Amino acid sequence: MRAPSDDLAKPQEGGSVSSGSSEASTDPLNPEQDEGWEDAEPDEEENLQVKDFFSDETFPNARAMLEFCQDQHGFDFVGVQKDLGLDFYSSIKLVNYLRSAAKAGNTNPDVSSKELFEDNKYLQPVIEDDALLFCLDELSDNQPSSQPAISNSAKGKAVDGDGDPFARIAELEEQLQRLQSQFNEYRLTVAKTLDERWNDKSSDAQADPSKQVLPAPKDDDSHYFESYSYNDIHETMLKDRIRTDSYRDFIYNNKHLFKGKTVLDVGCGTGILSMFCAKAGAKRVFAVDNSAIIDKARENIFENGLQDIITCHHGKVEEIVLPLNKGQKVDIIVSEWMGYCLLYEAMLDSVIWARDRYLKPDGLMVPSHCTLHIAPICDPDYIAECVSFWHDVYGFGMAAMMDKINDDVLVRHLDQDVLASEGTPFLQLPLHTISTADLTFVKEFETKLQRDVDGLDGWCIWFDTFFLPDRTKSPSTGARAETYKDEGNAFTTGPGGKETHWRSGVMLIDRRKSKQGQPLRKGQKLVGSVEYRKRKGNSRELDIEIKWDAEGGEEKGGQTWFMR
């Protein structure tokens, strides 16, 4: 979940990050400097707008907002203050903790302990000029909303009948002075927090260059989730009609499965699948994504008026807590988790975790099955154009450019005529029962050549995806998506179907490391094995090893390719 402190790491536009110097002109939080804070304390004549914690409603004062919050959301802010014994600063942290949770889509944040929001990052306002923060002193005094005030028509008379109005004025001035003092201290605390974050490491580095802290390398997840934060990749997927139409058609053609049901969308992206489910009659949809695209998804959902059905949750599905009652599960999990060669990016691990944690025993996985296929290829035109090309470039040899040229899995859409045989299924993944341990495997295959070839140039791997409405059923043996006619629907990423954004995985044989390709005859049998394993350096990447042997011939070999 994105913390509200993200903005702390960025200097104000047009300004500079504080370097710990005494230059007040560059410190927007210096209490000695009034510029920029004149409007921090709202004028009595201005219309104060206090935003509700969990909706977009605004109110003229804090008490009205808190009463609404208690009535509509069942959240008693003042009660939490009392129960946890919160002082002024802890109350500020509580406000920003609640604002942060609401921004992330959590309308029922845990407030059982003040340790949940003791981090100083919650001193940084989530909402700019949050009017509620200016009212905390009044709330902490627990003044009733009907507190007497000096009436214009009763000047010179006692406010409470026989009291001293000048004493009341003095009391109010003292209260205002206390509030101003507390906010000066608050700004000092925030400034100190900023300085510590910005300057500690740089000061150490200046004092002793050997202590300079280099940026930590990104972990497996950081780059992965960041790559899904931008529009381009989502535009590509949405424009893949084979992909998107398959999900839409299954959901809309099976509205009876979704009507009144609770759905979990793992890796929701722009929210398109969640919106399909809502339109099909789902009662409640949880849309989960750990990339910044979740903010756009939330806006998309509001734009289409589906916010009462779909709630967005920012974070890894393994780390967030869905707002379900104890023992409650979801009826359906929908997810577009497939990667290149099916298992690249390892998103299926998260979907399986979500299934085991949240899906009812009789719940439905959408899609329900995937099947991996392999076929040998013979494509001398491509080899000549993209590999042999380096032997003669305008009359110059550039063999150095061929180094590792065959090490990586290529992503290409192939024509069927480059296949030397039909695709052979080597693994079916039943999404209702498969485990993460099953995603690292060695599977054997066997195929017969459909034509004579001068030699094998490589291998092609693709997958079929099936959407079955009954979790107890599986695609029939030998079922192929491009000719599928049974219940539900399916699509293929292989040469037998229309091109998708996944295309196929193409693995070219490095003939510099193995015996030259041998001629093979139509009907000759090829046997071998395919191994999938996660890369040691990055668990979201793949190593794919293929071994093969042509019966009755000399063609035999083995090679590992990298999907990265």
Image (cartoon, rainbow, N blue to C red):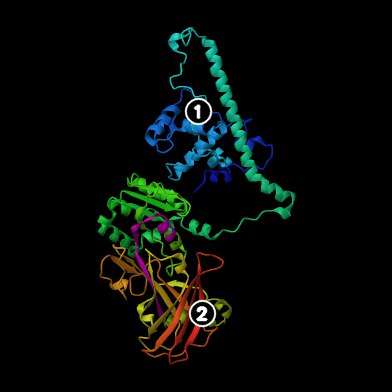
Percent x, y of residue 502: 40, 67
* Residue matched to label 1: 135
Q: Quadrant of residue 425?
A: bottom left
* Residue matched to label 2: 559
| Helix, strand or loop status at disc 2 | strand
Q: Quadrant of residue 55?
A: top left
The stretch drawn in magenta includes residue 402: no
Residue at 45% x, 92% y: name it. 553
Percent x, y of residue 464: 35, 70
> Can residue 515 be seen in this snapshot?
yes
| Helix, strand or loop status at disc 1 | helix
Badge 2 amino acid: Gln
Q: Is residue 168 left or right of residue 519?
A: right
Residue extent of the magenta highlight: 352-375
Badge 1 amino acid: Cys
Q: Is residue 171 left or right of residue 200?
A: left
CB-based contact (under 8 Å), mark 2 and mark 1: no
> Callout 1 environment at 10 Å: few (<14), some (14 to 19), or many (20+)?
some
Find the distance from the CA under tag 2 to the CA under tag 1: 69 Å
Q: Nearer the viewer, residue 80 or 380?
A: 80
Residue at 56% x, 68% y: name it. 536
